[in-house]
Structure formats: structure tokens, C-alpha cells
Image (cartoon, helix red, strand yellow):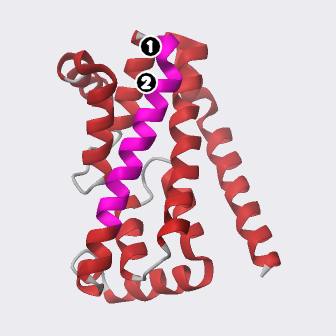
Amino acid sequence: MLRALSQWFVQHILPYGGPGLFLLALIDSGGIPIPQGVDVLLFAQTLHRPEWALLYATLATAGSLGGCLFLYWVSYKAGEVALIRRTSPERVARLRQQYEKYEAFTLLLPAMVPLPLPMKLCVIAAGVFEVRAARFTVAILVGRVIRYFGIALVAQQYGDQTWTFIRQNALAVGVGSALLVGAFFWFTRRLR
């Protein structure tokens, strides 16, 4: 399925280059989910033009940030009804506890790693629970920079061998990311 999705992106969006990547990231983060679409297109764009890897990562990050800010703003205005329509009351209560305890830092891990973390649900919750916009922006920006610049730089470095590299090192990267975020949460709690 990932290969078919990749081929579709290469045929229909790759010709639009960076603007297509920006638009896809904006749409995906703004509420219309395109699972792994931005990652696959960023990867394909970087393989196609490796010298533009940093530009592509910047455009993906900017588009995603713009979409997340839009979804945050809509959720902020809509209030708790936006969240209740998407999940159970028990999950709303758990999310509220996380946001009260960690605020925008709750967004960092979902912004960094692909599925299965429910990124849109976390963005909606941030708006509903009125996380400060500046903290929200920084958390999304840090997470997306790590994710998209990481993808672009790995694709630039390893080229066509990137999928092999990712498959062979996925567990290590996932564990390393989780440990990094865990250390970050631990450190921020100590500062309070």
C-alpha cells in the first residue's frame, strides 16, 4: 500500500515540487488526514532533487505548522464540543489531565513521530484546553523540524537505500525518540 501511495504522489503531486509539498502538509495538518502522505512526498521530492532537501523540509514544516495553527484556532473557538465529537468522555478527561500537567509538551511526541499517535486529536485538545498559542507553536515547530528535517536528511544521505535504512533502524530511532521526549518531560517537570 505504501508503495502504491508513493507512486500516486510521484505521478500527481511530485511535479508541483515544493509548493505541492507545502500544500499537502497544510491540508494534512489542517484537518484532512493523508496518512504518511507528507513523509512519502518529502522523501520522493528529496530523492528527486537531493540538493533541495533543506528547502523541502522547511516547506513541509511550514505547511504543517500552518495547518496545525488553523486546526488549533478552530478548536479554540469551538470549545469542548470539537473534542467530544471525536472521542469518548473518558479520553477527554485523560487528555485534559495531560494538558493541565504538561501543557504544549504533550504535543511534542505526536508531532515528531508518525502514526499511531493521534496528532489531530492532540491539536484539537490543545485548542479546546486553551494551551497558550506561543507554546503550542514552539511544540509543533520543534516536533515537525525533528521529523521532517530528519526524513529529508536521511533521504539525502542514503538516497534509494533510505527505506532499507529505515526498516533496519526503525526500532532504534523510535526508542531513541521516546527516550529523548521522556527525558525532556522529566527535565521540565524538575524545573517546575
Quadrant position of residue 179? bottom right
The amino acid on which the numbered mark 2 sits, given as a three-letter code, is Phe
* Bounds of the magenta segment: 50-72
Please name whichever residue, 90 or 40, is drawn nearer the observer in this view of the structure: 40
Q: Quadrant of the N terminus?
A: top left
Report if residue 146 lies within the magenta region: no
For the question of whether residue 163 can be seen, the reply is no
Q: In the picture shown, does residue 108 fall above or below 153?
A: below
Residue at the spot 54% in from the left edge and 80% down from the top edge? 98
Give the residue at mark 2.
43
Residue at the spot 45% in from the left edge and 18% down from the top edge? 46
Q: In the picture shown, does residue 64 fall above or below 20?
A: below
The amino acid on which the numbered mark 1 sits, given as a three-letter code, is Leu
Disc 1, SS: helix
- Badge 1, how many Cα within 10 Å: few under 14, some, many 20+? many
Report if residue 69 lies within the magenta region: yes
Which x, y percent locates residue 152?
A: 52, 26
79 vs 137, left or right, is: left
Give the residue at mark 1.
47
Which secondary structure class fits the magenta region best? helix
